[in-house]
Image (cartoon, rainbow, N blue to C red):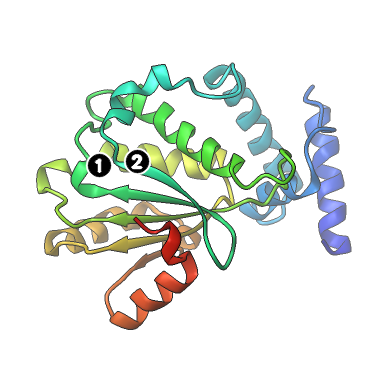
């Protein structure tokens, strides 16, 4: 971090502690993620961080989501944690669109817990010596081959993006979209307008053979299903 960032982190810590939340267990990189999400504004970043901590205290009181609370979502076997990517050593989540059976519309609370469970598990898989570094990022790929039109889940999309923006700032590295069906492009144009520019830039639709080859090199064949 440069001197300007260090000063912003120090100010943010001070603001967070004035609201009754100890900061000793959090590394500077954690606060820097929130600062970057709020254009390096310590006041706004501190507010976001405090809201995140209060949310986790209420939504994840055990510190993790028990698998018994997301049994239906896990039962679809639609998303897997595959390991760490070859180049950036980031946790890699792989989603099979053809197995998307249980939508957020049926059980929105369970779906939200499922997303938090996935993010937490993925991030923890790249901790060093069991400790958070603070700037861990997730790489994901969504295979849309065989994805049925009836499985389109606008509510699930909205929940996922909200959780990512509000509680996991700076956590998304890249998201690759594979084998997208024709109807998905027009839908994406509608959905993408609700995304911040920085998130839009991290979502990559694979089309050319060259892009696919680079994708395989970056992820590593050994962890691709």
Give the x, y percent position of residue 60: 55, 21
The crowding category of the residue bearing disc 1, from other C-alpha atoms within 10 Å (few below 14, some 14 to 19, many at least 20), is some
Residue, far front: 222
**Of 21 and 94, the residue lying toward us:** 94
Seen in the picture, residue 89 relative to 61 is either above or below; the reply is below
**Residue 61 location (% of width, % of height):** 58, 16
The N terminus is located in which quarter? bottom right
Q: Nearer the viewer, residue 177 or 77?
A: 77
The residue that appears at 22% across and 25% down in the rendered structure is 106
> Residue drawn at (63%, 51%), measured in percent from left and top?
136
Classify residue 89 as left or right of residue 111: right
Q: From the image, which quarter does the C terminus lie in?
A: bottom left
Tell whether 184 sits left or right of 198. Answer: left
Query: Which numbered dot is residue 216?
Result: none
Q: Residue at x 33, y 30 (%)?
A: 74
Label 1, label 2: how far apart the Cα atoms are: 6 Å
Task: Assign a secondary structure to mark 1.
Answer: helix
Q: Is residue 167 left or right of residue 179?
A: right
Residue 158's disc is 2
Question: The residue tagged with tag 2: helix, strand or loop?
Answer: helix
| Residue that badge 1 annotates | 154
- Where residue 170 sits: x, y (%)? 59, 52
Q: Quadrant of residue 69?
A: top left
Instruction: Give above or below for 18 relative to 164.
Output: above
Q: Nearer the viewer, residue 218 or 162?
A: 218
Q: Residue furthest bottom?
A: 210
């Amino acid at each position: 971090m440069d001197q300007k960032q260090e000063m912003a982190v120090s100010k943010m810590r001070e603001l967070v502690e004035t609201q009754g939340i100890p900061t000793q267990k959090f590394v500077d990189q954690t606060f820097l993620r929130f600062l970057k999400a709020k254009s390096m504004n310590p006041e706004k970043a501190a507010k976001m961080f405090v809201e995140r901590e209060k949310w986790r205290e209420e939504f994840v009181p055990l510190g993790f989501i028990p698998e018994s609370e997301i049994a239906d979502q896990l039962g679809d076997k639609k998303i897997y944690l595959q390991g760490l990517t070859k180049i950036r050593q980031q946790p890699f989540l792989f989603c099979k669109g053809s197995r998307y059976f249980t939508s957020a519309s049926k059980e929105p609370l369970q779906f939200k817990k499922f997303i938090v469970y996935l993010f937490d598990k993925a991030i923890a898989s790249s901790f060093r010596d069991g400790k958070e570094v603070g700037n861990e990022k997730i790489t994901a790929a969504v295979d849309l081959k065989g994805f049925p039109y009836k499985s389109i889940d606008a509510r699930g999309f909205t929940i996922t993006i909200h959780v990512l923006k509000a509680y996991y700032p700076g956590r998304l590295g890249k998201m690759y979209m594979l084998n997208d069906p024709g109807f998905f492009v027009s839908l994406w144009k509608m959905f993408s307008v609700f995304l911040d520019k920085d998130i839009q830039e991290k979502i990559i639709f694979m089309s050319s053979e060259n892009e696919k080859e680079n994708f395989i090199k970056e992820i590593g064949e050994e962890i691709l299903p």
